[in-house]
Image: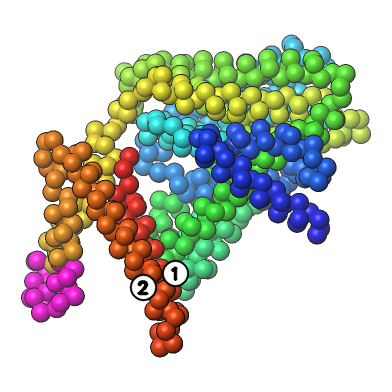
Amino acid sequence: MHFLVIQYTCLLVVILFIVMLAQKIRIAYPILLVVAGLPLGFVPFLRGIEIQPDLIFAIILPPLLYEAAWNTSWKDFWKWRRVISSFAFPVVILTSCVVAFVSFGLIPGFTLATGFLLGGIVSPPDAVSASAILKNVKVPKRFITIVEGESLMNDASSLVVFRFALAAVLTGSFVFHEAATDFVLVIVMGIVIGIVVALLFYAVHRWLPTSANIDVVLTFITPYAMYMAAEEFHFSGVLAVVSGGLFLSARRQQFLSNRSRLQGINVWEAVAFVLNGIVFILIGLEFPVIIKNLGPDVLVQAVKYSLIITGVLIVTRLVSTFGAVIVTIVMSKIITVADAHPGWKAPILFGWTGMRGVVSLAAALSIPLTLNSGEPFPNRDMILFITFTVILVTLVLQGLTLPALVKWINMPDPDLTLSLAQQRQLVRKKLSHLSLKILDEDYRDITKNNSMLNALKLRYSADMELLKDWDKDDTEARALEFYKDYRKVMARLLQEQRALLQTLNKKENISDDIIKQQMELLDLEEEKLRQYFEVE
């Protein structure tokens, strides 16, 4: 146990340096972590660190899914719900079927049930991979929403396909109508359980005397409670976490205090970063184990099968995206759709974001070593090798080429009638205008005699003065230049205030707690400055 702690500590240090290198060379860190994990897997000191399926599914996956759902806009998710649902369920099932029949006809010893097992494993794109890579490219907001929404939900449908295919291989029997009924039940009840558990935690947060620390701890318990409750009844734990996370995220202003929200964001970002780093480098570290189990005799054939299956996955996804465009155009004549004319650029980009990740490898590793009869599980090592190759090739090939593809296609954002900088300034202007209106109409008398309220009014008036240049025709560049100067001066003031606080902290008559409180306020002021005035 002591040695394992040392191993993981060293691994975390390695992850930090790899992520810093990825930021330096502007590559999405999941790609570099997987690639760097390949040679690290041969380092004797790191041997023994392997992906444990139970660890991924029960410990790492719930918080990662919850964090991703928490940061997903429910408004955008609902707007694009039809596209997201079509790729999360029908396209995953279609992909599983294509992979099943191709592998059945291609790989000796593969039955149709084994093919469906492989299809259920490799069919879902990875939510973490997609999010991390899309952060480094400039694409329309709707595109990011659809990709992240699909990646959140397709794990559930693929794992259900995997579950039924595994049962068919283990038992040797498969009844279609029973499987179809169970498929719907697993999905629907997973969503229901997720929302029920979310309601329980909503009540705890809102009506019990919690503090910021208690709220943050409860947010960590929540995804595990959702996942375990659903899995206990053999329903989809993934959909339980996603649905419950979306439900609570949309209502965070109602049951979390401002301090709980601020503290929770900082804690969750750090935890998600560590978990993401661990899972991606573990994929690379698993490579020597997979190679060893497969054996050198069939390695060349395994590489050939893996590349063919990877190509099938990429082509199937591209065909599905263009098929979805055709369906959307046809359905737009019958019902109202979010975008009746998707064009050709979005399908190409969307089709090229099918990076696979740790859920696929964890599912493959969860295949038992033997059948119910005690015989070795057929082609288990081949499935593992194909799964690993699919993850590696899609992450490296599609992840590295996606920025160039985005630049070449140059897809405009049809939803962005105002730039993000203009939207930010417009919102701030409306907030300042509302505050001044309330002060003038409801608190005019006490404002005159209250220096603090008068200073508050002057502050909002200053904000309006700062924002007024947006009303002119030719001043966006000029206004941004003003903001740069404003930010530069404010940053200098904050720096000098911190230096003064450090000096005051050396005096005996000033409490260290007071200094810390003022430092926190300056940190909040600097964060507000960064968010208000960051230039797109």
Residue 500 in view: yes
* Residue annotated with mark 1: 207
As drawn, is 20 to the left or to the right of 359? left
Q: Would you place residue 333 above or below residue 20 in this image?
A: above
In the picture, the quarter occupied by the N terminus is bottom right
The answer to which of 44 and 385 lies nearer the viewer is: 44
As drawn, is 54 to the left or to the right of 132? right
Task: Please identify the quarter of the rendering in which residue 449 is found.
Answer: bottom left
Residue type pointed to by label 1: Trp
Q: Would you place residue 179 above or below residue 72 in this image?
A: above
Instruction: Reply yes or no: does residue 452 show up in magenta.
Output: yes
* Residue 500: mark: 2
* Residues at discs 1 and 2 in contact (Cβ within 8 Å): no
Q: Which residue range is magenta in the image?
A: 440-457
Dominant secondary structure of the magenta stretch?
helix
Residue type pointed to by label 2: Leu
Residue 146 in view: no
Residue 101: x, y in percent?
Answer: 69, 15
Residue at 52% across, 49% down: 67
Q: Would you place residue 301 above or below residue 9 in this image?
A: above
Q: Residues within 10 Å of mark 2 (few under 14, many from 20)?
A: few
The answer to which of 238 and 3 lies nearer the viewer is: 3
Separation of marks 1 and 2 at Cα, in angstroms: 42 Å
Residue at 52% across, 40% down: 23
Q: Would you place residue 536 above or below residue 401 in this image?
A: below
Residue pushed farthest top?
105
Instruction: Reply yes or no: does residue 493 show up in magenta.
Output: no
